[in-house]
Image (cartoon, grey):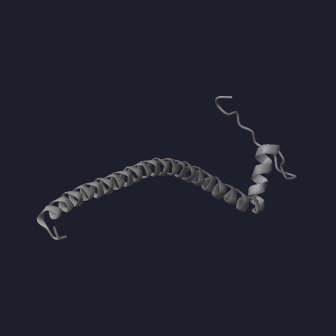
Amino acid sequence: MNRFSAEEKGNSHKASAAGTKRRKFIWTLVVAVFFGWAGFIFFAQSAAIAEKSEQLAKKQESNETVTTSLNQLKYEVSRLNDDEYVGQLARKWYNMYPKGETPIRTEQSGK
């Protein structure tokens, strides 16, 4: 028989079909492993992003409170540069009055 006989063509076709099935199976297995890995990474990163978002929200909330407190303190410092305000604080907290001024005390209800 020569190399192009019909009998040999049939055997090579069967071997070729088996090789094709094997390549398709390996390709499907590789694709399945890749998508499994990608899905795992996706869910792991989603959980990490959710945790980081929660931390960011807490830090932004604390940043707002700190900013509010800072603005209030800056306002108080600016008021301390005013002599009249300092005099009011001295009268209120330390009972310090200028000479010639007589304090008028009223009884407060509740005390």
Count up the numbered dots. Answer: 0
Name the side, left or right, on which 75 lies relative to 94: left
Rendering coords of residue 65 (x, y %): 59, 51
Q: Residue furthest left?
A: 6
At 81% from the left edge and 46% from the top edge, which residue is drawn? 102
Q: Position of residue 84 (x, y in %)?
A: 75, 59
Q: Looking at the image, is 12 positioned above or below residue 46? A: below
Name of the residue lying farthest toward the front? 1
Q: Position of residue 83 (x, y in %)?
A: 78, 61
Q: With respect to residue 46, does 105 lie above or below?
A: above
Relative to the observer, which residue lies in front, 82 or 26? 26
User: Which quadrant, please, contains the N terminus?
Assistant: bottom left
Which residue shows up at 76% across the image and 63% down it?
81
**In this view of the protein, which residue sits in the foreground, 105 or 89?**
89
The residue nearer to you, when weighing 102 against 4, is 4
On the picture, is 87 further left or further right than 29? right
In the displayed image of the protein, which residue is found farthest to the right?
99
**Which quadrant does the C terminus fall into?**
top right
* Residue 58 in the figure: left or right of residue 109: left
In this rendering, position of residue 99 left or right of residue 27:
right
Given residues 24 and 10, the one toward you in this image is: 10
Q: Is residue 7 above or below residue 29?
A: below
